[in-house]
Image (cartoon, coloured by chain):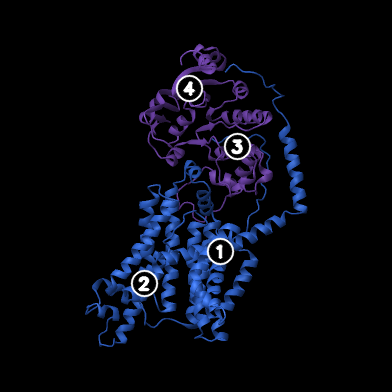
Amino acid sequence: MPLLEIKGLTTEVAGYKIINNLDFSVEANELRVLLGPNGAGKTTLIAMITGQFKPSAGKIYFDGRDITGWAPDEIFLAGISRKFQVPNMYETLSVYDNVMISLQGPRKVFRYMFKGVTRAENERIWEILDFVELAGKASDPADTLSHGERQWLEMGMLIASNPKLLLLDEPTTGMTEQGKQRTAQLIERIAKNHTVLLVEHDMQVVRRLGKKVTVLHQGQLLAEGPLAEVVENEMVKAVYLGKGRH
Amino acid sequence: MTINLAGGGSTPRKVRRARLIPIWALILGAFVLSLIGTSPHYIGSDSYVVGLIGKFLCFAIFALSIDLIWGFTGILSLGQAVYFGIGAYMVALSMKLNYTLENATRYGSNIPDFMEWNGLTEVPAFMAPLLSTPVAVALALAIPTLLAFIFGVITFKRHIYGVYCAVITLAEALILERFIVEYQAYTGGFNGITDYSNLRGAPFLWVIIAVTVVCLIGARALTHSRIGTVLKSIRDNDVRAEFMGYNVANYRIFVFCVSAFMAAGAGAMYAAWVGIVSFLDAGPMFSVEGVIWTAVGGRATLIGPFIGTFLVRGLEFVLSSSAWLSWLSEYWQFFMGALFIAVVLWIPDGIVGTIGNWLRKRGTGTLSQIRDDQDRLAHDRQRDWDPAGGTKPGKDPV
């Protein structure tokens, strides 16, 4: 049984179907790459899975449960963490606090009253800061970081939350070639024992990861399979090179 | 199963973090508060200035309650005076009822004069519990907190915040103000509640100081704890917090209730100390004044609301009591508006916030700047290292 299963998902905004009757699933411990031209519905799909928008039709199952229509915080607690397309964090908090707030643990108001950071939590935070190479800036406010560092901090926050499924929306945007390679390496390490759904534009990164890809086009599933096969697919070529179909 | 981070041998280091109560704050605070507390002895117990100091402390706690929701959680309330006002009216009513039991009105009845004027012959049954002081104090604290809870549930649970929330709180203050004026048989209407034996002098001033200390330490513990970090994270980015599993509405409701409780306490002490409560103390104008004091002193700092309140109210007092400048006090509201605009334009972090920024900048000015730069250089060199062995970027069919 797949970890994430989407059945007949449709999102309609003002009569335009952004996602159109999509069936899609991700197995546990899989690293899946989501491809597609602009407007294919990749980010919308992630917004649907995390409860930001409610679908017009269809169902989303996660870990054996129907999570369609749940609130974002409930979906997080079910085990899905999301990295936003534009790095999204707590700007005035320190790098350390950004990770601390994201740690797996209680989220209820009264469980949190006047509680400090335990020794184990502190060690875990430093471990994560080392992992994303931000230990040297632990006390700095997040808004002083560079764009690439912000991308890494948000990944660190996701790691801290220890989810069953990580949704990474274009984590390499705005990075240098080296930064992209290192991010790919980071994703590979995360994917060793976690399920990852990655939206990625950079083909160098996708090729390096060498995993199963899913191509979306106009809200529908266009092709699925290993990258080498998908690249040879006539329809995929048509969509990307702009021949036929239109 | 947690994500396995290779390396393993990382040693936990310390992060720069202020103490719960810094020593200098403890010494300075104890000094200032004992100076205030002993003021009746050297200024004179009945002095107008001593009266002002107690009043300003109540106002400062009120400003602190605004700071908790505005500065730390990002909820701008323009109706915080509602909670202050209800707290004040409960205590004022209680003191007035007790006062008239012993001191009959001009026409010989033992009910408050405003009730008498409005044709009531006895205290309404629903007000009778207020005759007991403990009950009155409990109600003064409980009713505003409960009201804040109800308000929070109907707004924050529906994802109403920001400007819309500010407008709703403003309406809340307008409604309460109208209510007080309309139901004058029970509230004293335009005249407010006055002529009761209020508590003056050193003993009650010490009570106000004690409550101030409790509020300050409580607010510090709250904002310093993990829940405080969550509140700040909601202020910075409520969407991210929501997608990190926090029920943002519940946190907002919680802090709104704490803030209302604090404002109600300030209002209750204010009524007991000053001896007059009017509809103005529950209205929008007073709410906005509290916001201005907080902004002037410094949002998201705990001492800021105190400095802001004492500066602005102190300035008002100096202006109105000076023979040369008293004509200016007629235009006080105009000054307040101008001051608020000036603060927003030039020192958006307020007095305390601006000084804090300046100190921080100076702290990393010379030696530590060089050290930071070296760290950064080493960091960047490490970042340039390419573990993949350099894949050449090339053209891609997909």
Q: Say if B299 sits above or below B328 in the image.
A: above
Q: Residues within 10 Å of mark 1 (few under 14, many from 20)?
A: many
Mark 2 and mark 1 lie on one chain; the one further toward the N terminus is: 2
In blue, which chain? Answer: B
Foreground pick, A218 / B266: A218
Look at mark 3 in the image and give the residue it sits on. Answer: A151
Marks 4 and 3 in Cβ contact (< 8 Å): no
The spot of residue B369 in percent (x, y) is 75, 50
Which residue, given by chain and number where applicable, does mark 1 sit on?
B296
Q: Chain of mark 3?
A: A
Q: Position of residue B167 (x, y in %)?
A: 40, 55
Pointers 4 and 1 within a single chain = no
What's under tag 4, amino acid-wise?
Leu
x and y, in percent, of residue A46 in the image = 47, 31
Q: Residue at x 37, y 59 (%)?
A: B171
- Residue at (35% x, 77% y) in the render: B193
Q: Which chain is purple?
A: A
Identify residue for label 2: B89
**Could you tell me the amino acid type at mark 3?**
Gln
Contact check, label 4 and label 1, Cβ < 8 Å: no
Label 1 marks which chain's residue?
B
Callout 2 amino acid: Tyr
Count the labels in the image.
Answer: 4
Q: What residue did someone put label 4 on?
A: A216
Which residue is located at x 63 percent, y 55 percent?
A: B17
The relative height of residue A13 versus residue B240 in the rendered view (above or below) is above
Task: State which quadrant residue B151 falls in.
Answer: bottom left
Within 10 angstroms of label 2, few (less than 14), some, or many (20 or more) residues? many
In this rendering, is residue A199 above or below A139?
above
Residue A48 lies in quadrant: top left
* Mark 4 and mark 1: Cα distance apart in space: 53 Å
